[in-house]
Image: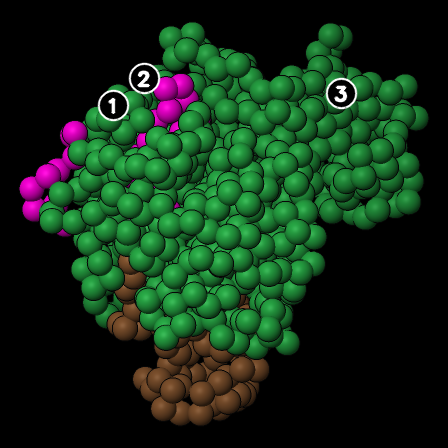
Chain colours: A green, B brown
Amino acid sequence: MIGEILGHFRIVGKIGEGGMGMVYRARDEVLQRDVAVKVLKKGVHADLPEGHSLLNEARASSALAHPNICTIYEVGETDGNVYIVMELVEGKSLRQMCDGNALAPEVVLRYGVQIAAALVRAHDRGIAHRDLKSANIVITPEGLVKVLDFGLAKQVEVRGSDEPTLSRASPGGSSVSGTLAYLAPEVLRGEPADYRSDLWALGVVLYEAASGRLPFGGRTAFEITSAILREIPAPLGPPVPPGLWATMQRCLSREPAQRYQRAGEVQAALEAVQSAAVIAANTRLEREAPRTTVLHSVRHVRFRRGDELLLVGTIKGAFILRSNAQRTRWEVGGPYFHGNAIYALAYDTRAGRQRIWASAQSYWGTNLRSSDDFGRSWTNPQESPIRFPLDTAVSLKNIWQITPGREDEPDTLYCGVEPAALFESRDAGETWSLNRALFDHPHRARWLPSNGGLALHTIVPDPADRQRMYVAISTGGVYRTCDGGQSWTAQNRGVRVTFMPNKYPDFGQCVHKIVMHPARPERLFLQNHWGVYRSDDGAESWTDIAGGLPSDFGFAMIVLPRKPECVCIAPVESDEFRCSCDGHLRIYRTRNAGSSWEALSRGLPQRAAYETVLRDAMTTDTCDPTGIYFGTRSGQLFSSRDDGKSWERIAEGLPSILCVRSASTADSGPAAGGGVARETSGAASSGSSASSRPSRTGKLRLSKKR
Amino acid sequence: MIFQIPAALREFAGGRNAVEVDLGAAPLNEALDRLWLQYPGLRDRIVTEQGQVRTHINIFVGDENIRYLGGLATLVPMGAVVSIIPAVSGGLRVAG
């Protein structure tokens, strides 16, 4: 088979053998991507009843675009070989991961929620899995669960009813551990199976993952069948939390009517355990030692299409807040990345994506993570993609900024890091490279760490000129490239420093933030470590615009999307006392590009409010009227929908806030066909949200070739 | 020798809390290379891209911190237990 061509798929290697046939790795010669091709055993499909063909079944399954379901791209037939082309999923099967080895409860919950989510989608589309088992569940290196073979088992099962143990390769397992151990009692009794039979199988999978053994075992098919029909599985105690055990028990109720009735109920139950449980770490070797407890409490907020979201990075994790389009009441979800400092967040809607990016810093280094499902699952690459080359002898300390590139270069992303350097990706964040010209800049040796370290924290691509981009370095100043990053010049003329004898050096400024309005790319605003400036000539020179401010020291700065003349900042008293002036939390706004400033305080605490708004902790949304949001060091989050005239506190008690970004579940990049019109929240139905969600795998194609 | 894997990294070790590396007595860096081979995701979490143990991570051979032994060159006896544990010195100081 190797080397053969099926349709436009060249078979390049064997992946494995399943009950239905062989699985190969293949190359799609048209789309130039690797896929998996399952070539069915002759006879598997031949004697199926008329009108009930495997092709129809596969077509139905192909409509299941979901991050936790292995996508079927195509079904075809050549020379009597029926083949199914699907997403190539690389990783370990859950069976391999938990064979004789219990997974930590938090891992079981994380995987369980994703498996349940896959079932929710399929059941909503009228498709039962019918062969759910740990061998059909693959965990990618990023920790994403993929359920394989949706709906494909039906025919096999029809034929195999007199042969209940489908002999499937099960590494390390007993020979009778294939499908049988996952079959629900009603299926064994020959009664009609329905979605609830999948929920039984999910219970078996959860039990297996949490304990490393099957709930109903036996050496022969008879023993297994007998156990399923008559026995009660051995209870699971600590470290399995009681809520997880209770969920499994309900899935494993012998009578379907006693089980959960819908996959969504199982998902909700598992999420509830996630958010409530204090899970004792599974420390087999340390059993005698005091228990370490890991508090695991992620709360996922449910989103509807058209909802507005706020992404909030704090020193102890990320939070996602949701509101409907009115943006009056906000629900807090999270924390994601417990205990990690989240310095940078970004939302990328280009090319139809809805991707959240986050940088997560902990003891274990700083990693770039992304989510295509609003936080339910996150990539977690084995190897950190942002790394300094060996010859630099430098190690990554932190990622301060993640900036999607211009609209017309949807696969370009930038990261600003500490120690100060710029990384670029041209493949949507898969691989990254260090910008050498800036790293090798002769000034670099004389850049100095500021209080927060030596960081490149701000990246401003010129939307009108692909060759032109600005970056800000503390302490180094503003640098500009006009040749797409081949060379960089310091652009700090007129920007004062207080900490050197020469107050106007070429470089060495401690710039805290620069902003640009996309409609006025020649104009920039700058919040300095002392000083507020504007440039009207692409950073050739800077003019002091701080007149009228109570202090020109500050960090955060934004320009309003619908008003290019309108800039907001959050001044603090001084370098030594980095708190809002006189205990009044006030935002200052100019509506004339810095000629005058006005204090905005309505709705903000004005008594003993000693707050700091850090450099990335203020942002706007894309709605009309514009929403402005900022977070404080004391974990309060404020919003305004009238350009800052009045404010409301929308969250409090969060950990210290490092960054705030907005996102919208209605967003879709122009590449997806000129953008998707916003729906009002009332018009969104549960079906529309799923079907109109852009798929990462691209458009599905199905063909039947003869 | 046996590596004890901290809870935060178990997802990179197939969910295991301990990993046995089939190696006689060997310097720690060789043993770690074997560990990375088995579980590549552990590497970038424990050492930097330049191969240095991360600042707030301690590695113990038996009960002793390798900092007071031979660092990454410490000879790990056959069958020894190597523990990877975050330091108490961690935590975050936010400037601003």
Using the image, determine if residue B2 lies above or below residue A59.
below
Mark 2 lies on a secondary structure that is loop
Residue located 25% across and 43% down the image: A548
Q: Nearer the viewer, residue A585 or A2?
A: A585
* Residue A448 seen: yes
CA gap, disc 1 and disc 3: 43 Å
Chain ID at mark 3: A
Q: Which residues are magenta?
A: A602-630
The answer to whether tags 1 and 2 share a subunit is: yes
Q: Which residue is under mark 3?
A: A702
Q: Residues within 10 Å of mark 3 (few under 14, many from 20)?
A: some
Residue type highlighted by circle 1: Arg
Q: Which residue is under mark 1?
A: A329
CA gap, disc 2 and disc 3: 40 Å
Q: Nearer the viewer, mark 1 or mark 3?
A: 1
Residue type highlighted by circle 3: Leu
Chain ID at mark 1: A
The image shows residue A177 at horizontal and vertical percentages of 56, 43
The image shows residue A528 at horizontal and vertical percentages of 37, 55
Mark 1 lies on a secondary structure that is loop
